[in-house]
Image (tube, rainbow, N blue to C red):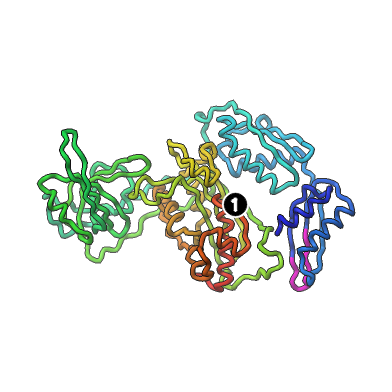
């Protein structure tokens, strides 16, 4: 609705760059106040034209007050905002930028143009410039065109000074005793086994113990032409799941082949990095079990960071409502609650390293819903630290390029800030339980964070409440009249936040 109103308002020559400042409803008086912001002089005729345009969208039962204010930024105001955006979104760049030398702003007939000197050249700077343009358009009227110039600094020589040093943390790996040992390939009985959830490091000598979920026989050909079997064994100890490959000795081949799902084994094994994930290879397989009635002990967690270091959340106010004239009262269950509604864009769909190389995160978008209102935003591109380029299908789907992620902070720096943003809140996402949360859990675990957030899924809620033809995000958004740019984390997260609020208003209780 907002875009429809502005399209008609901008037909007036003095309001051609107008933006929506706010919409206020007073239900007690049935009064609506619409505030527009323009950067050019306007006449009485322009005002009357705008009033008529807005009045069409206000039900007759409401009175209308139209307020138009004129805001004309100068070059210094725009430059200060650019510096602020870079500090918020691109702290690595902010650490080496000299605003006096590296940022220039000039006034144009319909807005402003600006140039930012960025190390790595134009391609690397496109993501920065596009982000700045979008943020400027949120603050000021008119058009903003950004350009990139080369920065004389070498990025490899830059050292970023963090705002506050966090205490170094390394969680010890947990173990449990192995019971009921019966030899198959080795007579040496291991005393203790690692929790599978903690076995995320390279090791030449480790022990795991648990129940077989699946065992598959395959074959390979040796250099001498001999064909030999090997086995892929998927097993769990209740804390995690591993897929272990066993290149079996001839003397124990039949015994390994006879193993069945639900049987419990103990494996001596080694782990090594292959691509972007760990590969586990058995050096000996025997029978063994965890203790009877085994209850995993809670893993020690890296503390929540004391401060934001790389990405800081921003206050958020949503003026573009689905329908300005719908009663926006919220159910009581929203009181004293906090939810982080999030969405990720990733390098692919692999959510578990046992299924192949674990894919990486390339964008995080999140909004904090406090007492039923969207109050804060956390948004950033993420460098997944991959040597291979993004697949073309990912770029076509999301619009995210290699240049954008290479210019972004590492996931190792972003995720601690995201953990701080989520602290004390439940998580909400669309298909989050099956997809997005698995990435967050995997990489946070890698960094030492033990996250056990409650996760609510709008996919499940919509299945329970709406009974639509399908429960895709865009289908549900269409049902509620919510428009957004699909397959970008920030936009998907905002749409999901709005959908979540609407679903709880229907349900009138939290899941």
Q: Residue at x 77, y 71 (%)?
A: 30
* 336 in relation to 474, above or below: below
- Kindly identify the residue that appears in the image at 20 percent across and 56 percent down: 265
Q: Label 1, secondary structure: give it.
A: loop
> Which residue is depicted at the point 81% across and 52% down?
69
Judge the density around disc 1: few (<14), some (14-19), many (≥20) Cα neighbours within 10 Å. Answer: few
Q: In the picture provided, is 140 more to the left or to the right than 472?
A: right
Is 259 above or below relative to 505?
Answer: above
Is residue 424 among the parts visible in the rendering?
A: no
In this rendered view, identify the residue nearer to me: 416 or 108.
Answer: 108
| Left or right of 82 in this view: 39 | right
Q: Which residue is mark 1?
A: 485
Q: Quadrant of the N terminus?
A: bottom right
Q: Which residues are magenta?
A: 25-34
**View extreme (front): residue:** 469
Whether residue 493 is visible, yes or no, is yes
Relative to 238, does residue 329 appear above or below in the rendering?
below
Location of residue 320 in the rendering, given as x and y in whole percent from the top left corner: 68, 58
Q: Quadrant of residue 287?
A: bottom left
Q: Chief secondary structure of the magenta span?
A: strand
Nearer the observer, 201 or 115: 115
Residue 375 point in image, percent of width and height: 62, 58
With 404 as the anchor, is 39 left or right in this view? right
């Amino acid at each position: 609705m907002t875009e429809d109103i502005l399209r008609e308002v901008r037909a007036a020559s003095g309001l051609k760059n107008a933006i929506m400042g706010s919409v206020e409803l007073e239900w007690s008086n049935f009064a609506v106040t619409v505030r527009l912001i323009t950067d050019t002089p306007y006449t009485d005729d322009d005002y009357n034209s705008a009033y008529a345009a807005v009045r069409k969208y206000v039900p007759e039962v409401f009175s209308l007050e139209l307020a138009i204010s004129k805001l004309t930024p100068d070059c210094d105001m725009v430059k200060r905002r650019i510096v602020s955006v870079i500090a918020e979104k691109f702290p690595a760049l902010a650490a080496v930028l000299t605003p006096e030398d590296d940022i220039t702003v000039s006034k144009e007939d319909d807005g402003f143009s600006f140039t930012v000197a960025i190390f790595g050249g134009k391609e690397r700077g496109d993501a920065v410039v596009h982000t700045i343009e979008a943020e400027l358009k949120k603050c000021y009227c008119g058009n903003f065109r950004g350009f990139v110039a080369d920065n004389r600094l070498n990025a490899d020589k830059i050292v970023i000074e963090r705002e506050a040093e966090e205490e170094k943390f390394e969680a010890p790996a947990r173990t449990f005793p192995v019971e009921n040992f019966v030899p198959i390939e080795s007579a040496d009985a291991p005393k203790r086994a690692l929790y599978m959830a903690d076995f995320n490091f390279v090791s030449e000598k480790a022990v795991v113990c648990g129940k077989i979920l699946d065992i598959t026989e395959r074959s390979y050909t040796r250099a001498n032409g001999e064909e030999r079997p090997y086995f892929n064994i998927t097993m769990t100890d209740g804390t995690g799941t591993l897929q272990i490959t066993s290149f079996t000795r001839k003397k124990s081949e039949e015994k390994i082949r006879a193993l069945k799902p639900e049987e419990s084994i103990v494996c001596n094994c080694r782990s090594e990095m292959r691509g972007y994930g760990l590969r586990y290879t058995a050096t000996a397989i025997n029978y063994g079990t965890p203790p009877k009635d085994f209850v995993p002990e809670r893993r020690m967690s890296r503390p929540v960071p004391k401060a934001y270091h790389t990405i800081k959340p921003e206050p958020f106010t949503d003026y573009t409502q689905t329908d300005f004239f719908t009663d926006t009262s919220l159910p009581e269950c929203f009181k004293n609650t906090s939810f982080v509604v999030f969405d990720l864009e990733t390098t692919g769909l692999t959510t578990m390293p046992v299924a192949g190389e674990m894919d990486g995160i390339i964008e995080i978008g999140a909004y904090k819903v406090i007492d039923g209102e969207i109050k804060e935003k956390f948004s950033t591109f993420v460098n997944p630290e991959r040597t291979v380029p993004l697949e073309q299908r990912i770029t076509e789907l999301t619009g995210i390029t290699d240049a954008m992620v290479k210019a972004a902070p590492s996931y190792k720096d972003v995720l601690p800030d995201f953990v701080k943003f989520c602290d004390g809140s439940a998580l909400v996402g669309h298909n989050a339980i099956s997809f997005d949360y698995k990435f967050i859990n995997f990489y946070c675990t890698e960094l030492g964070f033990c996250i056990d957030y409650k996760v609510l899924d709008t996919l499940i809620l919509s299945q329970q409440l709406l009974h639509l033809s399908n429960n895709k995000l865009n289908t549900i958004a269409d049902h509620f009249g919510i428009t957004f740019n699909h397959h970008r984390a920030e936009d998907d997260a905002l749409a999901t936040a709005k959908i979540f609020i609407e679903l709880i208003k229907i349900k009138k209780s939290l899941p």
